[in-house]
Amino acid sequence: MRTWLASLLLAMCAFTQAVAASPVDDLFGAVAIDNLRDVRRLIQEGVVDPNATDAKGDTFLIAAIRNDARRVTEYLIANRKVDIERTDAPQETPLMIAAWRNQKGAVEQLLARGAQVNRVGWTALHYAASIGSLDIVKLLLDHSAYIDAESPNKTTPLMMAARSDHADVCRLLIDEGADPTLVNERDLSAADFATRVGDSDTAEWLREREGAWRAKYASPSSTPPRQ
């Protein structure tokens, strides 16, 4: 009996070590610490699918962005074998994660590789607006991001900026043509969100913009701008 138990324990240990030492795990470990040398070696050896995912559903690229592994991120985006549109479990793209993490360099590189800016549901513009990144918001708009993109509950980037108390982003989006009269499924406008976070000045300014928008586009012949 003891011999059998000892053999079983040895087998379990060997199995655990084999799993822990898998190339995929090794590569995710290297990504987490921005170890470009090992990442490049493992991918060039061809022993790992560069689009493999971990238990959470993150790809190597998404993991690199989350871990702020700048060198590895740059290498993976430049690697044509890496699918820059592969999403994580919540269906977030690398561009969305880079916007959320305020990584302007990664956003620029992804855009240069042709990353999809507009998509159904949450977008990179929502994420950039929510963290108050003027630079990334401008970048995305320069790449034809739809300014009034609606999330699954009809929340727009302008609402996200107001909800997160980023008055400067609200003003930029309005200046670029965002519609301040839109409401989400809870019937909340950007001005309502500004009121909720206690930014009365921005809320008042947004309500003034609502009035100006309605007055300007009240005529049937007038068409609101769309990007």
Image: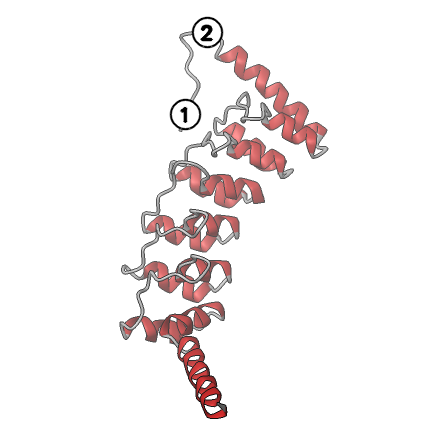
SS of the residue at dot 1? loop
Q: How crowded is mark 1: few (under 14 residues within 10 Å), some or many (20 or more)?
A: few
Q: Position of residue 50 (x, y in %)?
A: 32, 64
Q: In this view, does 208 lie above or below 73?
A: above
What amino acid type is highlighted by mark number 1?
Arg
Q: Quadrant of the C terminus?
A: top left
Question: Relative to 65, is 157 above or below?
Answer: above
Quickly name the residue at label 2.
Answer: 219
The residue located at (50%, 24%) in the rendering is 179
The amino acid type found where label 2 is placed reads: Ser
The disc, 1 or 2, on the residue closer to the chain's N-terminal end is 2
- Relative placement, left or right, of 50 versus 163 is left
Q: Which of 37 and 60 is in front in this view?
A: 60
Q: Is residue 121 above or below residue 95?
A: above
Q: Mark 1 points at which residue?
A: 226
For residue 118, side relative to residue 131 (left or right):
left
Q: How far apart are marks 1 and 2 (CA)?
A: 17 Å
